[in-house]
Amino acid sequence: MPVTNSKHFCIGLLPRTSLALVLALAGACDAGGFGASDGDGSTGASSTSEDGGTGSDASSSSGSDEPTTDAGGSGGEDEGDVLDLPATPFNYANPDLPAHFRTPLVRDLDNTPVDNPITDHGATLGRVLFYDTALSRNETVACGSCHRQAAGFSDTSQLSEGFAGGLTGRNSMGLSESRWYATGRFFWDERAATLEEQVLGPIQNEVEMGLTLTELVERVAARPYYRDLFIAAFGDEEVTTDRIARALAQFVRAMASYRSRFDEGLAAAGSIRSEFANFTAAENLGKDLFLQPRTACVACHLGGPPPPPGQDFRNQAIFLPLEPLNNGLDAGPVEDDNGVGDITGDPADDGRFKSSSLRNIAVSGPYMHDGRFATLAEVIDHYDSGVKPHPNLDPRLRGPDQQPRRMNLTPAEKSALVAFLGTLTDEALLTDPKFGDPFVR
Ligand code: HEC
Ligand code: HEC
């Protein structure tokens, strides 16, 4: 039973609330915020299972599936009871991508499956799921807890905290441009074959969210606000893991980063090689260095074939490698984490990792699969003088003698590279309400 006003579409957990609270919620929607839930003892994750008989509850199983481990109305952060969604869904399906995204090569990198294109209603459902703490066992953690919009959909901690306080085995990955990774494989070690498969991983992970898929479906079906969202996205209210996965994948694929200062500069200059008028001298120097064989950054992080002599880079948009690589973090196989090698069992894959996109990298530290580098300056120092002689070290980071290359960058060149990476920060994406938390908390 949505309560609407001129601008917003607010949905409360009405069956669980008193009439007085319904009015309070409606009022809060009108005011555009509902920040005082702590003061109101009757809100929060109250697990009262009596339905109020408003007729809007589509769930077949409320109450009985609530696990006893539920924190219930624990004082601190309340689970959102109210959604703030626009009456007409945001545009996710057709972002206004600039010309450098509309090239044949970039189109070829797109991993959107034909049977799960991004739709505005599908991504809207995905957005709600992404921020819903109901997807974790004790209702404390959502995808968005470890993939924070302001941090490029990454986490600023080296390892992320799961629902019971346990730590993840690796650093969280930034999610910008997930759509443009041609193999479609996900995670640092690429153990997920598709994004639709990946998004169910954290929900079932014992450290991260800790639900079984059966519990997941029960949880989602028990929340009245999902009914209309499933109908809009999929035609009827049936909740399935497949639909949850599709909606989450649509929302993640929609996280396209194309509104940074780099994009503005490129649109004006026409080529990544040209001087950008909107860049400082240091940023332009950093861009030059990034493109030079001396650093080889471009060869790995702007995936695509090397340009024929004198011609331009064919990919000037997607700052992702084409495949998992070894960038010399460790000398030889290590005890705890050999990346793709631990998945395939092939020693030739040891120490190979997928990289997340360099888009929004300045806000998404710490860096690398284990979050070992706290700053971009440390990352540059690694490439300059710290690359280790792993047997699978990528040839682009080796000298003619096959040993790890030393770049001999000056301090000014190092800070220029850091400055250039900062131009890939896309404030428009990081603050866009269509990617923000829709729960009014
Ligand atoms: C407790 C923290 C945590 C939660 C909750 C969490 N993630 Fe993650 N996410 C991570 C970590 C850590 C990684 C890297 C794990 C690895 O590679 O082994 C990751 C990786 C990913 C990736 C892979 C990105 C790439 O480029 O390969 C995607 C996509 C993703 N998460 C989406 C989600 C979605 C969707 C949810 C909610 C259903 C979610 N995450 C919940 C911590 C979390
Ligand atoms: C041989 C290919 C290769 C080259 C050359 C290369 N990188 Fe990387 N880069 C990678 C890989 C692979 C990773 C992920 C490694 C990991 O976490 O284990 C990575 C990770 C990164 C990260 C951290 C990403 C994250 O989300 O934590 C940054 C920043 C980065 N590289 C910047 C650069 C810069 C700047 C240069 C040029 C000085 C460069 N890279 C050169 C392959 C390369």
Image: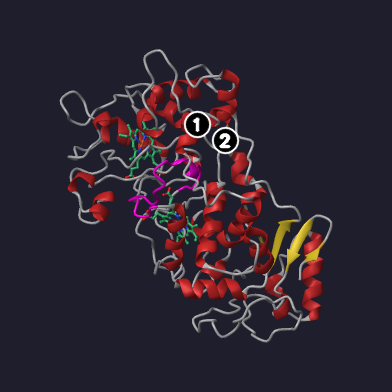
Which residue is more in the foreground, 232 or 155? 232
185 in magenta: yes
Q: Residue at x 28, y 50 (%)?
A: 340
Look at mark 2 in the image and give the residue it sits on: 258
Looking at the rendering, the stretch of residues picked out in magenta corresponds to: 174-193
* Circle 1 residue: 317
Q: In this view of the protein, which residue sits in the foreground, 427 or 14?
A: 14
Look at 32% across and 22% down and name the residue there.
294
> Main SS type for the magenta part?
loop
Q: Position of residue 27 (x, y in %)?
A: 82, 67
In front of the other: 185 or 288? 185
For mark 2, give the secondary structure.
loop
Ligand 1 within 8 angstroms of badge 1 C-beta:
no
Q: Quadrant of ligand 2?
A: top left
Q: Are marks 2 and 1 in contact (CB under 8 Å)?
A: yes
As drawn, is 322 to the left or to the right of 277?
left
**Ligand 1 within 8 angstroms of badge 2 C-beta:** no
